[in-house]
């Protein structure tokens, strides 16, 4: 009995002496995990006691068994060895993954907030970007167009709304004959109904803007509905004639609000108004249309129509309108294009 108790004492004493080494062994496990990461370990799949590297360079250790071997952990109880590898290490990896996910989400929200703030800020009215208004801005005359500041001759921009229609080809023929540029603002629904006419205008080199999908008053619509009017029309035109065809838009009736401008800015568009209204939308007399189109002025942004109703009087008045301004030595310009305004 005495010998047995004496033999047991050293064993018990040895186990007691080894316990203070636990902290060192935990640190060793941490070093091994860091070494695995530094060696390019991207993930492992475990089957029984073997571990296969999923991808990346061969790690320093290819088996979790080596981590739990007596050479590393000594004669620790089995439960303690598992806890060292499965507990602290797994917890550290989970915490690291959660931290990365939080940081990514915080970055996404910050960028989203920044975009929302930028979208809500509108530029001043009357700002041109070349021959198109700055996205989110609205222009209704040519007085602030920088590239025309030094121009001494009268400047005229002819624009036509509500097409394409059966009158579009006749108006286009007059413009080509007179070698005068102009800008067309098409309705998406009419482009769908008359794609050949829309393509004919584009093939002739005339710029085409959006006049919304079906001529709704944008000021009376919800922000989402107004945005859809612009986006859908632009898509119809661009799908038919090529991406980037639409460089600006015109609000039906000239009616819009800040929500309209934000929607336009979001789509990279500005709004083009007018300062000379021929009133051909309500007048069926070519003489009266001519008189309205030729009011005195050095910079004329003229509104006429090639669609939206009976436009015979507009077709008849157009040659006389062009002749009037040519006699004054006027320079005709096109809008909504990346090119510099051309001369007649």
Image: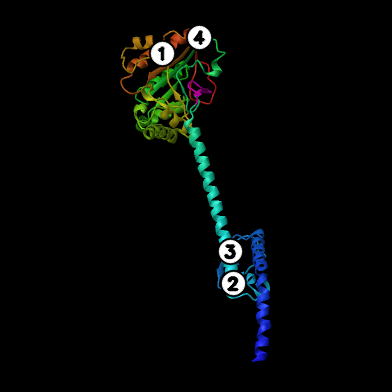
Residue highlighted by disc 4: 329
Q: Residue at x 57, y 67 (%)?
A: 86
Whether residue 270 is visible to the viewer of this picture, yes or no, is: yes
Q: Which of marks 4 and 1 precedes in the sequence?
A: 1
Give the mark, 4 or 2, whose residue is nearer the N terminus. 2
Earlier residue among tags 3 and 2: 2
Q: CA distance from mark 4 to mark 3?
A: 85 Å
Q: Position of residue 84 (x, y in %)?
A: 60, 68
Of the image marks 3 and 1, the number of the one nearer the N terminus? 3
Mark 1 or 4, closer to the camera: 4
**Element type at marker 4?**
loop
**Of callouts 4 and 3, the N-terminal one:** 3
Secondary structure found at label 3: helix
Q: Position of residue 103 (x, y in %)?
A: 55, 48
Give the residue number, with chain letter if any, for mark 1: 319
Magenta highlight range = 123-132
Comparing labels 4 and 2, the label whose residue is closer to the camera? 2
Residue 287 rendering spot, x and y as whole percentages? 34, 9
Q: CA distance from mark 3 to mark 1?
A: 86 Å
Per the model, the C-alpha gap separating discs 4 and 2 is 96 Å
Residue ID at (65%, 85%): 8
Question: Residues under labels 1 and 4: Cα distance?
Answer: 15 Å
Which label belongs to residue 88?
Answer: 3
Residue at the spot x=65%, y=89% of the render? 4
Name the outermost residue toward the bottom.
Answer: 1
Residue tagged 2: 80
């Amino acid at each position: 009995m005495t010998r047995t108790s004496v033999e047991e004492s050293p064993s018990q004493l040895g186990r007691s002496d080894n316990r203070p080494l636990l902290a060192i062994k935990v640190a060793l496990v941490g070093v091994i995990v860091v070494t695995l990461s530094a060696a390019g370990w991207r993930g492992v799949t475990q089957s029984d006691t073997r571990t296969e590297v999923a991808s990346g360079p061969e790690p320093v250790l290819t088996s979790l068994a080596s981590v739990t071997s007596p050479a590393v952990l000594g004669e620790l109880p089995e439960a303690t060895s598992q806890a060292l590898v499965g507990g602290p290490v797994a917890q550290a990896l989970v915490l690291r993954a959660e931290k990365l996910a939080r940081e990514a989400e915080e970055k996404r929200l910050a960028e989203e907030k920044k975009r929302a703030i930028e979208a809500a800020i509108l530029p001043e009215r009357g700002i041109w970007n070349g021959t198109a208004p700055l996205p989110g801005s609205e222009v209704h005359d040519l007085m602030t167009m920088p590239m025309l500041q030094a121009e001494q001759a009268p400047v005229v921009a002819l624009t036509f709304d509500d097409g394409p229609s059966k009158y579009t080809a006749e108006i286009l023929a007059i413009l080509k004959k007179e070698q005068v540029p102009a800008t067309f603002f098409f309705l998406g629904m009419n482009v769908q109904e008359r794609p050949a006419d829309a393509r004919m205008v584009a093939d002739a080199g005339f710029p085409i803007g959006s006049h919304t999908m079906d001529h709704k008053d944008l000021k009376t619509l919800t922000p989402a509905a107004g945005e859809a009017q612009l986006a859908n029309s632009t898509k119809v035109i661009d799908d038919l004639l090529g991406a980037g065809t639409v460089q600006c838009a015109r609000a039906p009736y000239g009616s819009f609000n800040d929500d309209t401008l934000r929607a336009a800015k979001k789509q990279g568009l500005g709004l083009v108004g007018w300062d000379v209204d021929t009133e051909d939308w309500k007048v069926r007399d070519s003489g009266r249309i001519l008189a309205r189109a030729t009011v005195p002025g050095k910079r004329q942004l003229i509104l006429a129509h090639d669609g939206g109703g009976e436009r015979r009087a507009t077709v008849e008045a157009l040659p006389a309108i062009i002749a009037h301004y040519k006699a004054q030595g006027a320079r005709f310009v096109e809008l909504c294009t990346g090119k510099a305004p051309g001369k007649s």
